[in-house]
C-alpha cells in the first residue's frame, strides 16, 4: 500500500478508536459482548480484510502494515480486536498461505468483507502446548471425512461462519505428520458449541468449546488438498500470528503509558504532581523503554517476514518479549495509579486483567523459549547465526 493510502487508513482507525471504541469500552465490559452495530462498522471500514490479498477483495496489507494497524486498534480494549482477530489472523491465514485456488476463491472474498468470520480450532482438552498430540480424528469415509473430537477455548467460535480445524486424518502416522487442516463451515451438521467460557478478563471476546460429532466434510476441504500437512500449516499460521500479537501488545502499551503519564501529571501528593518524583519517573521510564524495545523488535521482525525470510525464531522472540513487556507495563500502570489503579472505573484495572492472556495464547512464553532455543540449535547445525 502506498504511504498516503496507508496513512489515511491509520488515521481512520485512530479516529474510530477515539470516537467510537474507547467510549464503548465500559458497555462491552458490562454486557460481555461487542455491540452488533460496532461489528458492522468494523466490516464497513474493511477491518476484516486487512490481511486478505487485494485480488480476493481484502486490503492486502503487508505484515508490517497489519501490525501497525492492529497497534492502533488495540489502544481501545483488546476485545474489539478479537472480533476481527481470527479472521485477519489465525482463522484465515491457513487458507491464504496453503489453500488451493478453489479454496481461496470460495472463502477469502467473504472473509475479506466480514460477511464470513473464521476461527482457528487447534487446542483441545488434552492438547495445548503439545500441538502435535491432538486427538480429534478425521476418519475417511469414501470421498468424505467424519470429524470427531472436541476443540477448546476457541476464539470467536460463537460467531464463526467457518472453522479451520486441525484433525488427525492419517491413522498410521503418529505425531505431526498425521494431521490435516480442514475448512469446515460452522453450520455443518454434527457441530455443536459448548457454553461460553467465563474468563479472567477480555470480557466480550467470545470463546467456547467446539464439539465435532461425526461432522462430515468432503476431502476437498483439506487445506491445500494434500492430507498430512495440517500441522505445518498451523505452525506457519502461528509464526505469522505471533507478529500480529506484538501489534496487540504495543497498542495496549501505548494506552497504558498514556493513562499512567496522564495520571502521574495530574495526581498531587506531598504538594506536587507525583510525576515529579523520581521513583514514579523510574516506573514511567521503564515502561517507555519496554515500548520502544518492543517497537524496534516488531518492526524488524515484520520487515523480515515481508522479505519472505523464515521468522520462526524471531516471531517467537517477539511474541515472548512483547507479551512479557506489556505485562510489566500494565503492572507498573496499576502501581502508578495506586488505589485508583485497582478500581474498575480507571480502566487500568481492566487492562491489567486483559493483558494476562497475551503470555498464554498463541503459544505460552515457555513455548516461545523452546522454539527460540530449538531454532538456535538448528541454525547452528546449518552453520547459520
Ligand atoms: N513453520 C513450518 N514448519 C514447521 C514449523 C514452522 N514454524 N514448526 C515446525 N514445523 C515443521 C517441522 O519442520 C517438522 O517438519 P518435518 O516433520 O518435515 O521435519 C514438523 O513441522 C514437526 O515439527 P516439530 O518436530 O518441531 O514438532 P513438535 O511437535 O516438536 O512442535 C512446538 C513443538 C512446541 C513447536 C509446537 O507444538 C507448538 O508450536 N506448540 C504451541 C502451539 C500453540 O501455539 N498453541 C496455542 C494455541 S493455538 S491459538
Image (tube, rainbow, N blue to C red):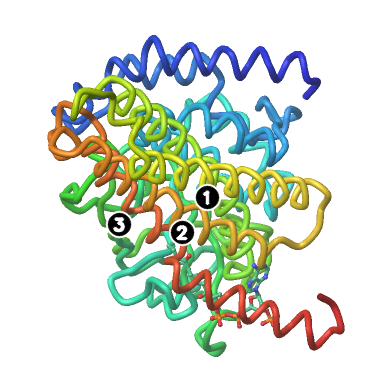
Q: Which of 73 and 161 is in front in this view?
A: 73
Rendered image quadrant of residue 216: bottom left
Residue 285, compared with residue 170, is above or below; it is above
**Cβ at disc 1 under 8 Å from ligand 1:** yes
Q: Does the residue labelled 2 lie within 8 Å of ligand 1?
A: yes
Quarter of the image where the N terminus is located: top right
Instruction: Name the residue at the right extreme.
Output: 383
How many angstroms separate mark 1 from mark 3 (CA)?
A: 14 Å
Please name the residue that numbered disc 3 is placed on.
153
Q: Which numbered mark, 1 or 2, is in the foreground of this view?
A: 2
Q: How far apart are the two marked residues, 1 and 2, measured between alpha carbons?
A: 9 Å
Callout 1–callout 2 Cβ contact below 8 Å? yes
Q: Residue at x 64, y 70 (%)?
A: 229
Residue 112's mark? Answer: none
Can residue 322 be seen? yes
Q: In which quarter of the image is ligand 1?
A: bottom right
- Write the residue at 38% across / 65% down: 123
In the rendered image, residue 49, in percent from the top left (x then y), is placed at 59, 29
Residue 177 lies in quadrant: bottom right
Which residue is tagged 2?
362
Q: Is residue 330 above or below residue 363?
A: above
Disc number placed over residue 90 in the picture, else none? 1
In this view, 18 is above or below 51: above
Amino acid at each position: 500500500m502506498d504511504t498516503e493510502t496507508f496513512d489515511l487508513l491509520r488515521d481512520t482507525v485512530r479516529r474510530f478508536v477515539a470516537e467510537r471504541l474507547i467510549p464503548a469500552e465500559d458497555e462491552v465490559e458490562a454486557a460481555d459482548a461487542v455491540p452488533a452495530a460496532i461489528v458492522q462498522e468494523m466490516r464497513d471500514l474493511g477491518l476484516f480484510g486487512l490481511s486478505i490479498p487485494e485480488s480476493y477483495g481484502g486490503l492486502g496489507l503487508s505484515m508490517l502494515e497489519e501490525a501497525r494497524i492492529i497497534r492502533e486498534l488495540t489502544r481501545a480494549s483488546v476485545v474489539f480486536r478479537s472480533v476481527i482477530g481470527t479472521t485477519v489472523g489465525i482463522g484465515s491465514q491457513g487458507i491464504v498461505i496453503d489453500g488451493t485456488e478453489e479454496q481461496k476463491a470460495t472463502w477469502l472474498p467473504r472473509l475479506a468483507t466480514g460477511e464470513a468470520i473464521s476461527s482457528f480450532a487447534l487446542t483441545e482438552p488434552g492438547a495445548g502446548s503439545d500441538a502435535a498430540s491432538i486427538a480429534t480424528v478425521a476418519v475417511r469415509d469414501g470421498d468424505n471425512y467424519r470429524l470427531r473430537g472436541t476443540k477448546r477455548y476457541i476464539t470467536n467460535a460463537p460467531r464463526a461462519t467457518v472453522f479451520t480445524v486441525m484433525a488427525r486424518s492419517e491413522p498410521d502416522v503418529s505425531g505431526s505428520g498425521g494431521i490435516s487442516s480442514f475448512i469446515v463451515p460452522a453450520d455443518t451438521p454434527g457441530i455443536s458449541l459448548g457454553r461460553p467460557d467465563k474468563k479472567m478478563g477480555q470480557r466480550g471476546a467470545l470463546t467456547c468449546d467446539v464439539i465435532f460429532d461425526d461432522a462430515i466434510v468432503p476431502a476437498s476441504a483439506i487445506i491445500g488438498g494434500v492430507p498430512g500437512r495440517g500441522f505445518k500449516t498451523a505452525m506457519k499460521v502461528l509464526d505469522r500470528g505471533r507478529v500480529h500479537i506484538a501489534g496487540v501488545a504495543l497498542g495496549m502499551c501505548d494506552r497504558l503509558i498514556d493513562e499512567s503519564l496522564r495520571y502521574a501529571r495530574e495526581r498531587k501528593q506531598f504538594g506536587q504532581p507525583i510525576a515529579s518524583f523520581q521513583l514514579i519517573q523510574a516506573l514511567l521510564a521503564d515502561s517507555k523503554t519496554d515500548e520502544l524495545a518492543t517497537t524496534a523488535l516488531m518492526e524488524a521482525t515484520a520487515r523480515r517476514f515481508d522479505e519472505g525470510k523464515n521468522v520462526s525464531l524471531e516471531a517467537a522472540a517477539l511474541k515472548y518479549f512483547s507479551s512479557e513487556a506489556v505485562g510489566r507495563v500494565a503492572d507498573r500502570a496499576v502501581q502508578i495509579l495506586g488505589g485508583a489503579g485497582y478500581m474498575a472505573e480507571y480502566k487500568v484495572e481492566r487492562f491489567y486483567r486483559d493483558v494476562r492472556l497475551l503470555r498464554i495464547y498463541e503459544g505460552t512464553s515457555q513455548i516461545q523459549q523452546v522454539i527460540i532455543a530449538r531454532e538456535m540449535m538448528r541454525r547452528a547445525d546449518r552453520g547459520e547465526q
